[in-house]
């Protein structure tokens, strides 16, 4: 095992341990521990994907998630909107990465009916939330949820792991949005939001990382074949 692989394994273990501590703190009502661990989650995951050879833009998506995590837990309305903007920037990073892996436009043409399902789900959910959201949140929530839905749809392209991450992200932020609309929440709502969120970020980021690793292996194999062909013609 290479040094980079060992480092990646250690960082992945650190992310798993930190996630467990954070979720346990939420269940136990230990607010201080929960507030301290939440902003540390995505930087550790970003370090993992970088150590595993992922593009730096993927780490950027996760660090924007850290910005959102930090700002949202302040409880300040203006900072909440800034946190939503930070998450939106993270989704833009994901969309750029997924587009480079062929999610658009060919994937859109091939998956037209499925795209319509995702679009209808977004429209229906926003329509249900709209009357119960405060006026200053309606447009930001609609715009952010559209970006999130686009990410979830694009994540279908790399494979089931990334697709699962996109769906879990939809679930996590849907739970959060219903709280903003003052809908009835399940017991330990914040625990479920963070459980699905951390699982979503890991599955989505690791799915994208694997897609790029597969491309690099394909390129490497192509280069080796090309070299062999050149050698065979020159010997």
Image (spheres, helix red, strand yellow):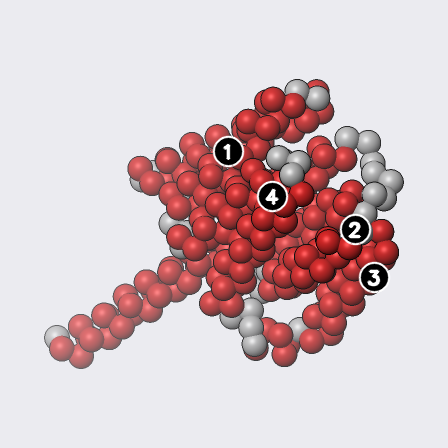
Q: Which residue is mark 4?
A: 79
| Mark closest to the chain's N terminus, 1 or 3 | 1
| Mark closest to the chain's N terminus, 3 or 4 | 4
Q: Is residue 115 left or right of residue 215?
A: right
Quarter placement of the N terminus: top left
| Front label number (3 vs 4) | 4
Say which residue appears at 71% left-offset and 60% top-offset. 139
| Mark closest to the chain's N terminus, 2 or 3 | 3
User: Is the Cβ of the residue at disc 3 closer than 8 Å to that at disc 4?
Assistant: no
Spatial CA span between label 2 and label 3: 14 Å
Say which residue appears at 66% left-offset and 73% top-offset. 111
Image x and y of residue 176, in percent: 73, 44
Spatial CA span between label 1 and label 4: 18 Å
Q: Which residue is mark 1?
A: 40
User: Is the Cβ of the residue at disc 1 closer than 8 Å to that at disc 3?
Assistant: no
Image position of 15 with respect to 90: above or below: above
* Mark 4 Cα shell of 10 Å, populated few (<14), some (14-19), many (≥20): some
Does the image show residue 152? no
Spatial CA span between label 1 and label 3: 35 Å
| Front label number (2 vs 3) | 2
Please, what secondary structure does the residue beneath circle 2 have? Answer: loop
User: Is the Cβ of the residue at disc 4 closer than 8 Å to that at disc 2?
Assistant: no
Viewer-proximal residue, 198 or 71? Answer: 71
Q: Which mark is residue 134?
A: 2
Image x and y of residue 89, in percent: 53, 55
Image x and y of residue 117, in percent: 76, 68
| Front label number (1 vs 4) | 4
Please, what secondary structure does the residue beneath circle 1 have? Answer: helix
Please, what secondary structure does the residue beneath circle 4 have? Answer: helix
């Amino acid at each position: 095992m290479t040094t980079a692989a060992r480092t990646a394994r250690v960082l992945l273990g650190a992310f798993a341990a930190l996630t467990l501590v954070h979720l346990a703190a939420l269940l136990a009502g230990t607010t201080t521990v929960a507030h301290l661990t939440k902003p540390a989650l995505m930087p550790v995951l970003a370090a993992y994907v970088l150590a595993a050879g992922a593009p730096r833009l993927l780490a950027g998506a996760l660090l924007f998630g850290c910005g959102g995590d930090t700002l949202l837990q302040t409880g300040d309305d203006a900072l909440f909107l800034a946190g939503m903007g930070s998450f939106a920037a993270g989704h833009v990073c994901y969309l750029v990465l997924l587009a480079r892996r062929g999610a658009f436009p060919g994937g859109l043409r091939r998956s037209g009916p499925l795209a319509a399902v995702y679009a209808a789900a977004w429209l229906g959910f926003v329509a249900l939330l709209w009357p119960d959201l405060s006026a200053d949140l309606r447009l930001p929530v609609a715009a952010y949820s559209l970006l999130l839905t686009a990410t979830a749809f694009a994540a279908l392209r790399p494979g089931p792991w990334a697709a699962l991450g996109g769906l879990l992200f939809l679930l996590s932020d849907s739970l959060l949005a219903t709280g903003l609309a003052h809908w009835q929440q399940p017991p330990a709502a914040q625990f479920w939001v963070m459980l699905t969120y951390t699982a979503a970020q890991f599955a989505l980021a690791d799915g994208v990382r694997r897609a790029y690793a597969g491309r690099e292996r394909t390129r490497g194999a192509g280069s080796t074949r090309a070299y062999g062909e050149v050698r065979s013609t020159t010997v």
